[in-house]
Image: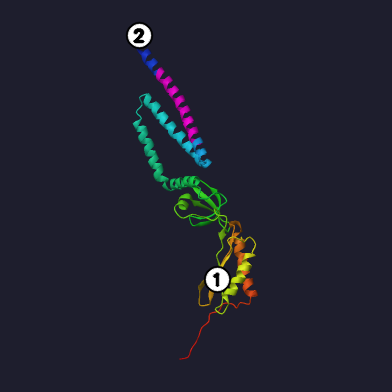
Amino acid sequence: MDIQAMWIKVEPIMMAFGFKVVGAVIAYLVGRWLIGFATGLLQKLLERQKVEPTVTRYFGSFVTVALNIVLVIAILGYFGVETTSFAALIAAIGIAIGSAWAGLLSNFAAGVFILILRPFKVSDYIEGGGIEGTVMEIGLFGTVINTPDNVRTMVGNAKIMGGNIKNFTANPYRRVDLVAQLDGSADHNKAIAMLREAVAKVPNVIAEPAPDVHVLQFTEFGPVLCVRPYCNNAHYWQVYFDTNNAIKDTLGAGGFPPAERHLAVRNK
């Protein structure tokens, strides 16, 4: 076997392959640099838009992985490897994962929108997904809420975003809704004046807007007064209970009789 003749035949092939390897290495290094540059640019853009850091990191990781896959497939195609099957395999894997994790992915998508739109933040008192309480943590898949009875509850983000969200902390004050039942024989104007004065003195009730005390409706017992002071959300329950006590004490001190049902019996 003539080794020299064989080498003459193999040499061009080896040199072409070597150039391809060098070209692939250069393409990989340049591609990696471009991916890092694009990812950094995207993260800076999101940071300027004041997007939640968790979302920024996620998009950066997602773009990095996706572009790296594209880069590897492109390099394989450069070497003449059939890449159609790789693309089909990746698409099939994506569909399978999407079908298996449909609920999880919907929670994830909703979590991204919560972090971007910011309908509430940690420490806000909200009602969402049928749960009311203080937000302790906002995750990409679920939101952790401490309910008033001190039960830590995780609610799926999709459930929160799929319904109405009440944020009780967003505004500087909120209204406490209470009622006072009067007897039919009571002087409701006198009761209204006394309750307005008494409720205004309840600790943490704000002066403006002033407490509302009006006739709300009438029952078989007599008129029903709405008693509505305003306070900061942090003082809601204290004002709620103290106002109830003020209603009881004020009506008792004013000599208002307890509400009774009055029936008139007539003989025909």
Query: Of all residues shown, which one is farthest toward the bottom?
Result: 268
The percent coordinates of residue 179 (x first, y second) are 55, 69
The percent coordinates of residue 71 (x first, y second) are 42, 29
The percent coordinates of residue 67 (x first, y second) are 43, 32
Which residue is labeled 1 in the image?
A: 225
Q: Quadrant of residue 17?
A: top left
Residue 1 visible, this angle: no
Magenta span of residues: 18-43
Amino acid type, residue under disc 2 in the picture:
Ala
Instruction: Return the mark for residue 5.
Output: 2
Looking at the picture, the colour scheme in use is rainbow
Q: Main secondary structure of the magenta part?
A: helix
Viewer-nearest residue: 17 or 29? 29
The residues bearing labels 2 and 1 have C-alpha atoms spaced at a distance of 110 Å
Q: Residues within 10 Å of mark 2 (few under 14, many from 20)?
A: few
Q: Residue at x 54, y 72 (%)?
A: 224
Q: From what the image shows, is residue 69 above or below residue 172?
A: above
SS for dot 1: strand
Q: Is residue 191 magenta?
A: no
Q: Residues within 10 Å of mark 1 (few under 14, many from 20)?
A: many
